[in-house]
Amino acid sequence: MSKKTQLAKNTIIIFFGRVCTQLISFFLLPLYTSYLNTSEYGVVDLIQTYVTLLVPIITLELEMSIFRYLVDARGSNKNTKKLISNNFFVLGVSLGIFSLLYIIISCFINIPFRWLILIDIIVCVLSGNLLQVARGFGKTLDYSISCILTGLTTVLSNIFLICFVHMGAEGMIISMALANGICSLYLFFKLKLYSKINMEMVDFKLLKDMYKYSIPLIPNGISWWIVNVSDRSIISWVIGAGANGLYAISNKFPTIISSLTGIFNLSWSESAALHINAEDRDEFFSDITNTVIKLFTALGVGMIACMPFVFPILIDSKYEGAYQYIPILVLGTVFNVVICLYSQVYLAKKLSKQVATTAIIGAIINIVINVLFIKKIGLYAASISTAISYFVMMVYRHIDLKKYINIKIEKGLILKTILIFTFAIILYYQNNLILDIISLLVVCCYAFLLNKEFLLASMKTILRKLKRSR
């Protein structure tokens, strides 16, 4: 199986699983915006933000290390058992220390839903870690099934707790914890991890090596948190939870692109790690980069063009202010697609320090713009700061990666991308039905022409496989 075919196969398998969890919040938007006011939704979003921050700090990014080391250990049962044993030893110690500190701190600080949040953090740590273990084993199907279970649990529990029990924000937090708990249990027993744990195999030298890889990713994780979601903390402090609720809703649409990027990167990270030293790596990485830029550019401008028709259907009128910030956030998210693509190249070469450095630069830019302008231009400052920080990070990483691998962007692709985004965004803010229809038609034609070769090649591959299966 060729490199690109293997990458495509893994991406498709993971897609069907991750779409259930990564896109679930989007499909639940009508429920959230109907039953929760902007302040309630803003509070829950802020809680999720801080859970996202705490998880990599608690684990010291162990999940990233365990995945990378398990890929190298494939075929060696002894090394696999040693890695799993060390993984669970560290998880137990880390969660024990964190829980004790959390309980002590919560005695002095009033934390809303404090016990639910603690449970949510613990199961998020476990599910995130076990998902990476599944990937490290190459068990993409089990990975996807666990994600589907997570998605179904999230939908059913949210509907029950919010619509019928009327638990509001508390119901959302319980749903998150329940979904991640079921994911963890499924993977633990499906992968038979209980048979691979032997505390006598705990090796502190191995742990030291693993943390040499993962610890530099901690500032990277924190920096990504700053770039991605610190906006919400600043908004809540300066403007209020209601404004954060609006901003959170406007972010839900670009999150679709982020989710698809995350799905692709799960399989891309494995391919990058396996083929980083191949003779044709420059051509392979350049080909993938150009293909991804084309696909996600089409998706980004397509989302902007569709938004005038989709937004009023999905979102309750009390959240209509969120409409204004979506194009800027979509543009920033497309920049982020390239950043994530390059991140996996760094990590494949085990250059985690470089990942952290570039992320810190983006984080500083994000905070400075927010602090300087949020009182003057409100939520526009948050969306613009995100787009600018992503753009700077993208350019920096592209230049820096030249030291290690020669990724070439097709001639004219950057100019085409700038022109189509400018066209779509200008027409978006005209609030004119005729112009919205024109924008949608032009963008659809552009998206097809830009990706014509990829789409035709994909169709030929599918038809060929259908003929063989008959």
Image (spheres, rainbow, N blue to C red):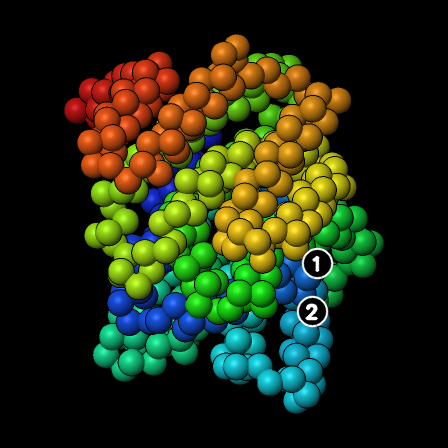
Q: Which quadrant of the figure contains the N terminus?
A: top left
Give the number of callouts.
2
Q: Is residue 246 above or below residue 240?
A: above
> Residue 113, position in %: x, y?
50, 81
Q: Secondary structure at mark 1?
A: loop
Q: Amino acid at mark 1?
A: Leu
* Quadrant in which residue 236 is drawn: bottom right
Residue 94: give its label.
2
> Residue 378, position in %: x, y?
52, 55
Q: Which residue is mark 1?
A: 60
Q: Is residue 211 above or below residue 295?
A: below
Q: Is residue 399 visible?
A: yes
Answer with left or right where residue 254 lies relative to residue 34.
Answer: right
* Quadrant in which residue 434 is drawn: top left
Q: Are marks 1 and 2 in contact (CB under 8 Å)?
A: yes
Q: Look at 37% across and 55% down and name the residue there.
A: 321
> Residue 385, position in %: x, y?
58, 45
Residue closest to the far front: 376
